[in-house]
Image (cartoon, rainbow, N blue to C red):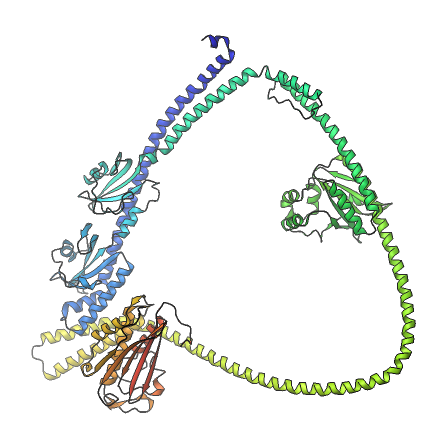
Amino acid sequence: MEFLQTSLTARLLTLFLLLAIVPLAVTGLLAYESGRQSIVSNVEAHLESVAILKEQEIDSWVHHLEHTITWLASSPQTTSGAAVLATHTAGDPQVLASHDALVAEFGRITDLEHVSPVFLVDSATGQIIASSDTSWEGQFRDTEPWFIHGKTVTYVSDIRHSLALGQPTMVIATPVKDDRGQLLGVLAGHANLEGLSEIMMERSGLGETGETYLVNTGNLLLTDLRFEPGVTFRKWAFTEGVNRALAGESGVGLYPDYREEPVIGSYRWLANRHMALLAEMDQAEAFAPIVALRNAVLQIGLAVALVVAGLTLLTARTITRPVHQLVVGAQEIGRGNLAHRIETGARDEIGQLAGAFNDMTANLSHSLGEAAHGQRTLLALSQAAQAVQRARTPEQVYRAIGDEVAGLGYHALIMHMAEDGRHVALVHHTFESPLLEAAEKLAGLSARDYRAEVRPGDHRYQVLIGGNTIFFEHMSEPMAAGLPKLARPVLTRVSAMLGIEQGIYAPLKMGADTQGMMIVTGTGLTEADVPAVTTFANQAAIALENARLYQELQRHAAQLEQRVATRTQELDQARRAALNMMADADDARRMAEQANEDLRREIAERIRAEEELKKYRDQLEELVEERTGELREAQERLIRQEKLAILGQLAGGVGHELRNPLGAIKNATYFLNMVLENPDLDTREMLEVLDKEVNTAEKIISGLLDYARARPPTRRKVDVNQVVRETLSRTSLPGAPRVEVVPQLDEDLPLILADPDQLSQVFGNIIRNGIQAMTTPSSPPQAGGKQGAQVGGKQGGLRLTITTALESPEWVTVSVADTGAGIPEENLEKIFEPLFTTRAKGIGLGLALVKTLVEGHGGTIRVESQVGEGSTFTVRLPLGTSTPAKGEA
């Protein structure tokens, strides 16, 4: 207390601290509480919006899967296939074809959507009769709720753990009905919950600790947790938010989460899905801004206290410190230290006195500096004037000027008047080349080609015409007048790059004649340097005039020497001419003999050139013929590709359009066979013919659809021998049992990258063609490729030989040889064309499809055949994924 009474500084310090800290503490506390409540409200509203958005995304995802299953159930392929499976016996070929078509259609859906597997269930027995995963076929699902409800409406099950799949799933089921509304079966699919997990794991707007997850009615987690991955269907959650949501409530609150970490959470009960949705964020992250505000308030309070204490101490010292500084300053200046300054921030009379003291010292220092600078500059320029007078050429004068000015730390530019008297051109400068090149690029100008117009009234006119020396405090003014408008925005950067700040323009005058002007520029020039630069410019002008006179004297002396040398040379030439006339006759004779020899050599060269020209002409004709053939082949190939594209579109459209009426005819035939108990012989024969022809038409349509649906191969590692064996096990034709099939498979073949389904289709078509060639009656070959009424080709039985081999480290070959009637030579190039056929069977798309699929793998196919002996088809496939270039063997 006694210290406060005796020390004014202590009393001021205490008062100022109380006045600064108390209001700041009250304001900070109020701001902290208000900010905390605002953050809680904002985060709760944001998490509630996130939960609502997630619920909408889940509904959209489920609706999309429902739409996929219902669309597939109502598609013509599914309804027609289901009708065949429901009305035909298991051994019927049409059942097998419909089953394979449904499996392929279901497989495409599983590739495109988050549904796998997709299967068709018999509505009467509950047995799976067709599935994208064929291992499911034959299983019964008649007690499943989705099967019971799926007979009448589209049904979506709750998420549950599937023992068959070994993972959580959701089943979507819907009825499959025909055009009359008759139930054909139930189409169902297991939803892949990866899409649902992606929705819940997407954390946009949730910060660093935010997450969303789902819980079923048994408190079991349905999706992964961010901080505990891999707990789906393995962990139970009993937090306050989960319990409230499972009780049918939806809201927000502050509670511990499954980690016992305090969180701000939004919980919602999804009644239509029978599960709870949670969106949560750690309170530590949510309250981080307000905690930072609290810390900032404390730091600001401490800083204010320190500042107030410092200002208080500073105020107490403002009375004695300026007087002490004035005393010290006077002592320093008395010792000759003109650079000393009195530093004080006071604005009272003492501060004004210190400022006047500093101004007096600065002016005195500046005056002394200018006097010393002027003396140094005048001495240097005087020496430079003596140096330029020793130069003998304008270039030497320019170099001498530049060297002397550069020695002073400045730059020199020399500009001469043009012949028109209205322009000046830059003839010399002392800027360093790298800096000048950079400045030229920046300004878009070339110093070598720079020309400036002399306009009445401008600074160049005043110097050149008026003979005045001009000082520029800022060189940007005269530089801007000499630059194009587009280059002026970069003027500041150019000036800084070249070190240009002030400048002096002085005329180069010799008497009344002005030859140009000299510019001295740099940093540190003043008005005091103008007389010295003017004197130096006058001396330089005299040096240039002396150099010009010296060069002219040198030129006159050279001209006189040249005249003397020319006259002497003329006399020597006259004497030599008399001597040369005597030797001209011998020279003429020798020249005639040389001319004859040159003529004979030229004739021989022309004969050889004509022979070379004929040879080149023949080679050119051969090259033109070769290129013409290649162009013709390319045109034919392009036309064939366009035809194939059009044919593929037409085949797909026609196949789809014909399938439904043929199915109706097939069903009608089956119905007539069922209702007619004892049909007469003609009726029975007509029904058999009708059924046979419909089967034939369906095979043709299948060929059309296969050709139209040809797609790029889906490659994976394939065992070619295994594909051949499976194809043989599935291939059957009338008469095939009479054919001996001889597989000759190389068991050491490496795996290749290929599409096994397309390879099976290729080998199946070739094998069926070979069997048909050996079992179909034909006549001896006739003109045009027609064949007659004999079976097979070679004597000794019907044999189909299938051979696999490794042709090289990059290629595998598969050959199919038959003992059929063979193919006429004129048809060998046509059999792979669409719609080409020489028999009644098929429409000629099988081999065209084979060629398309093989070439899609980057392979080739060729055929070798001899009429009466049989045919051999060889498929050549690459081991890898690269496609060989055309012409590779």
For the C terminus, the quadrant is bottom left
User: Taking 253 as reference, is 415 above or below it?
Assistant: below
Number of numbered discs: 0
At 26% from the left and 61% from the top, the residue drawn is: 109
Q: Is residue 585 left or right of residue 602?
A: right
Of residues 702 and 611, the one nearer the viewer is 611
Q: Is residue 34 left or right of residue 723?
A: right
> Where residue 704 sits: x, y (%)?
29, 74
For the N terminus, the quadrant is top left
Could one spot residue 500 in this view of the protein?
Answer: yes
Of residues 346 and 720, the one nearer the viewer is 720
Q: Quadrant of residue 587?
A: bottom right
Of residues 661 and 641, the one nearer the viewer is 641
> Where residue 146 sits: x, y (%)?
16, 55
Q: Quadrant of residue 876?
A: bottom left
Residue at the left extreme of this rendering: 678
User: Taking 422 as reference, is 732 above or below it?
Assistant: below
User: Taking 5 as reference, is 352 above or below it?
Assistant: below
> Where residue 849 sits: x, y (%)?
31, 75
